Image (cartoon, rainbow, N blue to C red):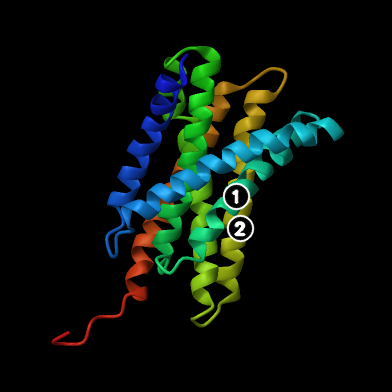
Amino acid sequence: MSPWLSIPAGFAPSLLWIWLVHRHDDHEREPVLLVLAALLLGGLSALAVLYVRPMVEGVWSPDVLADAFVVTALGEESFKLLAFLPLLCHRELDEPLDGVVYGAAVALGFAGVENALYATWTDSLGVVVQRAFTATLMHAGCTAAVGYALAGWKLDLQRPRCWRKALRRLGLLLAAVLLHGAYDWFLLVERPSVPMALLVVLPVTLALFAAVLRWGRHVSPEYHPPHPPGS
């Protein structure tokens, strides 16, 4: 399939999902250009994985478990985290919900590249439609949780710290890697269990995605002090 078709088709689901996420940014909506930049950074992180992964596999032949949880899940989430860091340092990221928005955008940029590649390799748009509601959302849910956790740590530097909050955010990072790894493991094992990946792991990931989105919307107003009268 021509890249002129596979690239826009691969990114179409990502643009749809990030539009829906962006609409939930109630309090101080993020600049569209910065959200698009997050998509681009996520796409570049996917290309970086394509470059680095063969080198890793050239010196290490992991079994299926290590492949799913270490090479794929931990590796991909690490590269997406690196893509997220410039956004984390940006002044526009000033509330926990922003971490969810930019984290999801990075993940959806990553998934857009993957979708385009799969469409090219299989010469089928059907795989993009299938992945739009499966792997694409899995990426978004995992990295949105990572973004929420990192945004919370950044913003807590200016507020009273709570070790319980820090532990919960560490748990979100761990959950993102474990869910990502479990999803891939069920698809990579010798006897793949697609129903477990799609009917158990994916719904849990989507529930986590919905939770951090809800938490972000709930606490973000605290980071926007009311304007004084007459301002």
* Labelled disc at residue 171: 2
Crowding at label 2, few (<14), some or many (≥20) Cα neighbours within 10 Å? some
Secondary structure of the residue carrying tag 2 is helix
* Labelled disc at residue 33: none
Vertical placement of residue 19 versus 63, above or below: below
Q: Nearer the viewer, residue 86 or 208?
A: 86
Task: State the residue at coordinates (41%, 32%).
Answer: 11
Vertical placement of residue 30 versus 15, above or below: below
- The residue furthest left is 230
Task: State the residue at coordinates (75%, 31%).
Answer: 54
Q: Position of residue 162 (x, y in %)?
A: 56, 77
Q: Quadrant of residue 218?
A: bottom left
Quarter of the rendering occupied by the C terminus: bottom left
Q: Position of residue 225 (x, y in %)?
A: 30, 80
Q: Quadrant of residue 99?
A: bottom left
Task: State the residue at coordinates (36%, 68%).
Answer: 220
Is residue 17 shown to the viewer in this render?
Answer: yes
Task: State the residue at coordinates (16%, 87%).
Answer: 229
Name the residue that disc number 1 marks: 175
Q: Position of residue 203 (x, y in %)?
A: 47, 37
Q: Position of residue 166 (x, y in %)?
A: 59, 69
The total of numbered circles placed on residues is 2
Vertical placement of residue 78 versus 6, above or below: below
Kind of residue indicated by mark 1: Ala
Crowding at label 1, few (<14), some or many (≥20) Cα neighbours within 10 Å? some
Q: Quadrant of residue 4?
A: top left
Kind of residue indicated by mark 2: Gly
Q: Nearer the viewer, residue 2 or 207?
A: 2
Tell me, yes or no, whether the two marked residues, 2 and 1, touch with CB atoms within 8 Å.
yes
